Amino acid sequence: MRRLSLVIAIITATASPALAAGPTGVWQSEKNDEGRWIEVTIGQCGPQICGTISEVHGTTDRSKVGMQMIRSMVSDGPNSWDDGEIFAPDDEKWYDANMKMLSGNQLEVSGCVAFGLICRSQVWTRLR
């Protein structure tokens, strides 16, 4: 019984911190059709979550670095955020957005139109 308790304690201690950290950190987007991807630094902006493009890969155009990409996200339950907006660099428009932690190192980010009926999602990977 002691071994089982120890194993459960170890699993809980190693799994919980990543989810508990929420979306705060540096994330790698999925690659687009041209093989380009970005790094987004996500953190607290007062009571809300926001994110800034911190690096671009696969292009020499660095004009989007430093640009806010995620804004006004608020907690919508354990490991999910809603009521925010996301900037889509490919068409330079803002969309209604939500985010959900799939695991400690995976974040599903969705931009939606038509009151959330039509969404485009990506799964981002935590870099740090």
Image: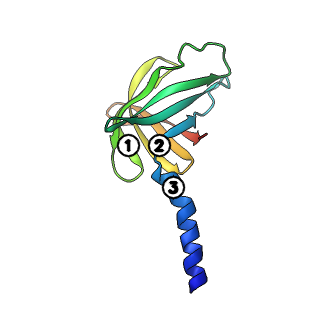
Vertical arrangement, residue 86 with respect to residue 75, above or below: above
Residue placed at 51% from the left, 55% from the top? 17
Could you tell which of marks 2 and 3 lies nearer the N-terminus? 3
Q: Is residue 77 left or right of residue 13?
A: left
Disc 2 or disc 3, which is closer to the eye?
3
What mark, if any, has residue 81 been given in the picture? 1
Considering the numbered disc 2 on the image, is that residue within a helix, a strand or a loop?
Answer: loop
Mark 1 or mark 2: which is in front? 2
- Give the mark, 1 or 3, whose residue is nearer the N terminus: 3
Residue 24 in the image, given as x and y percentages of width and height: 47, 41
Q: Amino acid under label 2? A: Pro
Q: How dense is the environment of label 1, judged by Cα within 10 Å: few (below 14), some, or many (20 and up)? A: many
Q: Position of residue 117 (x, y in %)?
A: 37, 37
Instruction: Kindly identify which residue carries mark 2.
Output: 23
Can you say which quadrant of the picture contains the N terminus?
Answer: bottom right
Determine the CA span between mark 1 and mark 2.
9 Å
Which of 19 and 116 lies nearest the eye of the viewer? 19
Q: Residues within 10 Å of mark 3 (few under 14, many from 20)?
A: few
Q: Are marks 1 and 2 in contact (CB under 8 Å)?
A: yes
Q: Residues within 10 Å of mark 2 (few under 14, many from 20)?
A: many
Q: Amino acid at mark 1?
A: Trp
